[in-house]
Image (cartoon, rainbow, N blue to C red):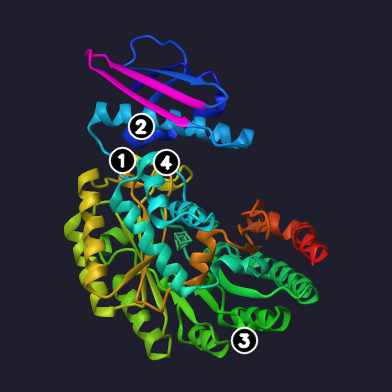
Amino acid sequence: MRIQLNGIDDERFYRPLTHIVELFFEESDMYFESVESPELTITIDIQTDEHQVRTKASGVTETGGYHESSFHEHFTPHMTDKETFKLIKRSVSYVLLTILEDVTGVVQKWGILTGIRPTKLLHKKLQEGKTKEQAHAELREDYKIHDEKIDLMQTIVERQLQVIPDLYQLNKEISIYIGIPFCPTKCAYCTFPAYAINNKYGQVDSFLGGLHYEMREMGRWLKDNNIKITTIYYGGGTPTSITAEEMDLLYEEMYESFPDVSNIREITVEAGRPDTITKEKLEVLNKWNIDRISINPQSYIQETLKAIGRHHTVEETIEKYKLARSMGMTNINMDLIIGLPGEGTKEFQYTLDETKKLMPESLTVHTLSFKRASEMTKNKEKYKVAGRDEIMEMMDLATNWTATHGYVPYYLYRQKNILGNLENVGYSIPGQESLYNIMIMEEQQTILGLGCGASSKFVHPETGKITRFANPKDPKSYNDGYEKYTKDKISLLEDLFGSLKSHN
Ligand code: SF4
């Protein structure tokens, strides 16, 4: 689709508007200047004075169809320049979305929201003191979000506050993410830092050396500054792709270095790939009281696993799940993916039927997204995925199945280029929710990232301002620079929590 967009001079609008267009057309070319024979021409007129913004749009298709849309809102007193800009951006997104919905007949239930964390927006409104009704009205009117999605957000926000009643007060504690960048093989849809472990023997040792160092130094700083840890999450890669002995040493380090580990609310280890799970490793997890693991089938269809490069069998998933259960693991999460290549409602229903035989405590249902860097995206023609309507049907199957089997949704996030512009939803049997997932999504506290590919988010305890810091993705760069990254992060922590001390 060739689209010409007139009237947008401010380049800061280009990206958000392109994202809106991408919700409707998989392949589109956007032009912010005159081009020859566009298939759709949209003209936007933004009028502002010191009181208000009025934005109008008209769209003309090549077949002569004509569509119009408008938006009007008053500025509130004392709005900053940034807030004013955001409102104008919202107005432009709003009129563009309305025109595109009219032209295509496709309805976007998330409205103009293209960000990752819808529930954070609802939390923010509630924290500002708005009533539930006010907040919902704003989501509906300002963002064009449909009631079905607002209800989902509300259910999730309420559930989160039940599970973590002090969620809004946890800004003086932190959570920790530890990234282990190795996997047995690389999956086709993966953009995580994951290196096939077989080829990298030497690097595992040096990587773990760096990680132990980071854990020791960070732990010392946290102890010295009396900062508590709320949750810890080992991700990657697959953290169980290292040996049982290496895992044992790592958790020993955690207990020795970090403050008050026995009172941390939750420690999770991703054991995503069943081909990495052994009796010895489960014994190590038990030894160190690791509460929660994740074993990820993604699908129970063998051909699908093969097509996406997960070199394990369906039987292995079931067998390892049962092994973990028999060894006392009482909080197991499983990840499923809607829309894997070659799969439709029939295959997804089969996966749900198989899940019923296992009944994990929590179930994260992802919708496939075509991330730019993945093998799948680079060779898109090789991977045939279901159409938009079928993806929606699969999502409905997941929603109904989880509700019928006693699961409640407790966190949600969205991604760019996600099939059907849908979402990823974490469901859980009540009381077994992953607290870390809530912390990472709602950004109420600092998450310190250690290890490879781990990104840290420093959330200012008073202003909520977020500063990001990324450790490198590849083990080699990490090994070369971990001392510096540790130092840099400690200085960022000093900035955050130091200001707190001077206020007290
Ligand atoms: S198991 Fe996970 S981290 Fe590893 S390659 Fe597959 S998707 Fe990536």
Which residue occupies the foreground of this view, 364 or 284? 364
Q: Which mark is residue 262?
A: 3
Q: Secondary structure at mark 4?
A: helix
Which residue is under mark 2? Answer: 97
Q: CA distance from mark 1 to mark 4?
A: 27 Å
Going by the image, does 302 lie left or right of 472? left
Is residue 56 shown above or below 452?
Answer: above
Q: Earlier in the sequence, mark 1 or mark 3?
A: 1
Q: Mark 3 belongs to which amino acid? A: Ser
What residue is at 43 percent from the left and 56 percent from the top? 131
Which residue occupies the foreground of this view, 140 or 309? 140
Q: Earlier in the sequence, mark 1 or mark 4?
A: 1
Q: Residues within 10 Å of mark 1 (few under 14, many from 20)?
A: many
Residue 120 is situated, as x and y percent measured from the top left of the image, at 49, 55
Residue 473 is situated, as x and y percent measured from the top left of the image, at 61, 54
Going by the image, does 180 lie left or right of 319? right
Which residue is under mark 1? Answer: 108
Q: Check if mark 2's residue and mark 1's residue have beta carbons within 8 Å.
A: yes
Q: Mark 2 belongs to which amino acid? A: Leu
Q: Earlier in the sequence, mark 4 or mark 3?
A: 3
Which residue is under mark 4? Answer: 378
Q: Check if mark 1's residue and mark 3's residue have beta carbons within 8 Å.
A: no
Q: Secondary structure at mark 3?
A: helix
Q: Which residues are magenta?
A: 52-73
